[in-house]
Image (tube, rainbow, N blue to C red):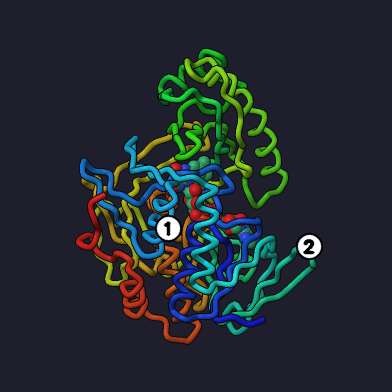
């Protein structure tokens, strides 16, 4: 089975890549190991977009194109909350609505989606990736294409296909955390992060039974359920033993966090709706791209001739040693340009990476990994791959396709929230 473009992984980056590629007319296959699209948004309880809006007093939306279409469809279903400000600007959504929206968006664009297939290998020929191997209940299957986009978050396709990758960055790898969703909170109850942290402290004063106390408190639309990111673990997702320990330990902690929540007024009848279901890996492999995007680029608000997306999130770092979190804002809490060269493999000309495996240094990577920005880098990688499939890849042509698809490429195009 041969395609123009194969996209590996159906999270925010992968869906945007596949839809963008298919909208150029390229025959596009999206392979997802789970039974639904959305990645962390639907499988890790990360039910709120970051990176869509600048973080100043008057936020501006910096992501459009496929991302804009997703927001419109969620809004039409009453499944998207207006932007909310904590340390950043968040846009919570209902994950079940997102699953449907992403299915429909892919179908409308003509993307062929295959669920429940895990990419387990990739063949390389003459310095290019030529096919991927998958495993499913039907056994092993191989799919060939002219160009590939790795949106697995863990860089599976790139690594299996012999492209240059690295795990995290030499000065650190962002900590993983289990997203936990609680229901049964009395209507009108506001749960403040500081109150929750105090409740966790009071119940577990020596901190040995739980790993973190501070989290944003996200309330999702429709259900009003509360999502917190607390139980954390410094595991390596490439190592099944260490990830398995994290999963089981995180689930055990979730019940302790529930007990702490129940001590707050209005939360006495709270219950666990879901843990994960998967532990949330913030950072894993990065593709080694033609350029590594740096925090210095963001601080300088560097102009890139090959700009393909606008970022707005800060360097959100969750430390593996201390389990403490920090957040560095971009200059003036404004937007910055993201270059195509941080998505294009440096040694495999028909391979692109997007979302959290885009090439960034410790702080830039921690800024551009979020889902709003992943929608934008995914769309860019999809357009670039569609061009590469016809040996027509260059930055200017990618920008032309992105503009035709409604993506924002300059700060001037961004719109008031
Ligand atoms: C605890 C936590 C809290 C976060 N909070 C926020 C937040 O509030 N807002 C925000 O915007 N971002 C947040 N993030 C970051 C965000 O979730 C990710 O950076 C973002 O989802 C990256 O998108 P992606 O498409 O690159 O990867 P993912 O969302 O991880 O998607 C990758 C997809 O690839 C699939 N896949 C993986 N390997 C294979 C394979 N071998 N074969 C086939 N399919 C495969 C996976 O099943 C998955 O669907 C948070 C992350 C964590 C862990």
Crowdedness near tag 2: few (<14), some (14–19) or many (≥20) residues, C-alpha within 10 Å: few
- Indicate which disc residue 20 carries: none
User: On the rendered structure, is 146 left or right of 23?
Assistant: right
Where is residue 308 shown, x and y percent of the image? 34, 67
Which image quadrant for residue 307?
bottom left
Along the viewing direction, whichever of 219 and 12 lies nearer the viewer: 219
Q: Looking at the image, is 109 positioned above or below residue 194?
A: below
The residue drawn where x is 59% and y is 48% is: 43
User: On the rendered structure, is 366 left or right of 34?
Assistant: left
Along the viewing direction, whichever of 342 and 253 lies nearer the viewer: 253
The residue drawn where x is 77% and y is 70% is: 140
Looking at the rendered structure, the secondary structure element under dot 2 is loop
Instruction: Determine which residue is flagged by label 1.
Output: 70
Where is residue 322 shown, x and y percent of the image? 49, 31
Where is residue 295 shown, x and y percent of the image? 33, 52
Which image quadrant for residue 407?
bottom left
Along the viewing direction, whichever of 204 and 43 lies nearer the viewer: 43
Front tag of 1 and 2: 1
Q: Earlier in the sequence, mark 1 or mark 2?
A: 1
Crowdedness near tag 1: few (<14), some (14–19) or many (≥20) residues, C-alpha within 10 Å: some
Looking at the rendered structure, the secondary structure element under dot 1 is helix
Q: In which quadrant of the rendered image does the N terminus lie?
A: bottom right
Instruction: Determine which residue is flagged by label 2.
Output: 137
Residue 13 visible? The answer is: yes
Residue 363 visible? The answer is: no
Q: What is the residue that sits farthest to the front in this orientation?
A: 77
Where is residue 397 shown, x and y percent of the image? 35, 80
The residue drawn where x is 28% and y is 67% is: 304
Q: CA distance from mark 1 to mark 2?
A: 31 Å
């Amino acid at each position: 089975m041969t395609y123009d473009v194969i996209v590996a992984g159906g999270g925010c980056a992968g869906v945007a890549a596949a839809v963008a590629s298919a909208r150029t007319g390229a025959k596009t296959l999206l392979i997802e190991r789970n039974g639904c699209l959305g990645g962390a948004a639907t499988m890790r309880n990360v039910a709120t977009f970051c990176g869509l809006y600048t973080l100043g007093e008057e936020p501006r939306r910096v992501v459009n194109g496929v991302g804009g279409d997703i927001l419109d469809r969620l809004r039409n279903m009453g499944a998207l909350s207006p932007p909310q400000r904590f340390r950043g600007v968040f846009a919570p959504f209902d994950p079940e609505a997102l699953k449907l929206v992403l299915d429909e968006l892919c179908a409308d664009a003509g993307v062929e989606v295959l669920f429940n297939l895990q990419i387990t290998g990739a063949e390389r020929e003459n310095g290019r990736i030529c096919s991927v191997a998958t495993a499913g209940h039907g056994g092993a299957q191989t799919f060939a294409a002219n160009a590939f986009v790795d949106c697995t978050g863990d860089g599976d396709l790139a690594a299996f296909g012999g492209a240059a990758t690295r795990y995290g960055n030499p000065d650190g790898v962002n900590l993983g955390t289990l997203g936990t969703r609680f229901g049964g909170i009395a209507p009108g109850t506001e749960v403040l992060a500081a109150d929750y942290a105090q409740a966790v402290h009071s119940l577990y004063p020596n901190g040995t039974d739980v790993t973190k106390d501070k989290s944003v408190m996200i309330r999702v639309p429709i259900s009003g359920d509360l999502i917190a990111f607390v139980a954390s673990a410094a595991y390596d997702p490439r190592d099944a033993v260490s990830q398995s320990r994290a999963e089981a330990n995180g689930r055990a902690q979730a019940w302790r966090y529930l007990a702490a929540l129940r001590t707050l007024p209005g939360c006495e009848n709270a219950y666990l709706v879901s843990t994960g279901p998967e532990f949330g890996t913030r950072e894993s492999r990065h593709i080694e791209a033609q350029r590594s995007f740096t925090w210095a680029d963001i601080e300088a608000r560097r102009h890139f001739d090959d700009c393909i997306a606008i970022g707005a999130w800060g360097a959100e770092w969750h430390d593996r040693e201390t389990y403490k979190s920090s957040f560095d804002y971009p200059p003036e809490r404004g937007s910055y340009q993201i270059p195509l060269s941080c998505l294009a493999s440096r040694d495999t000309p028909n391979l692109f990476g997007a979302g959290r495996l885009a090439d960034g240094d410790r702080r830039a990577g921690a800024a551009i990994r979020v889902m709003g920005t992943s929608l934008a880098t995914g769309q860019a990688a999809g357009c670039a791959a569609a061009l590469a499939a016809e040996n027509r890849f260059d930055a200017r042509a990618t920008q032309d396709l992105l503009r035709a698809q409604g993506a924002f490429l300059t700060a001037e195009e961004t719109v008031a929230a």
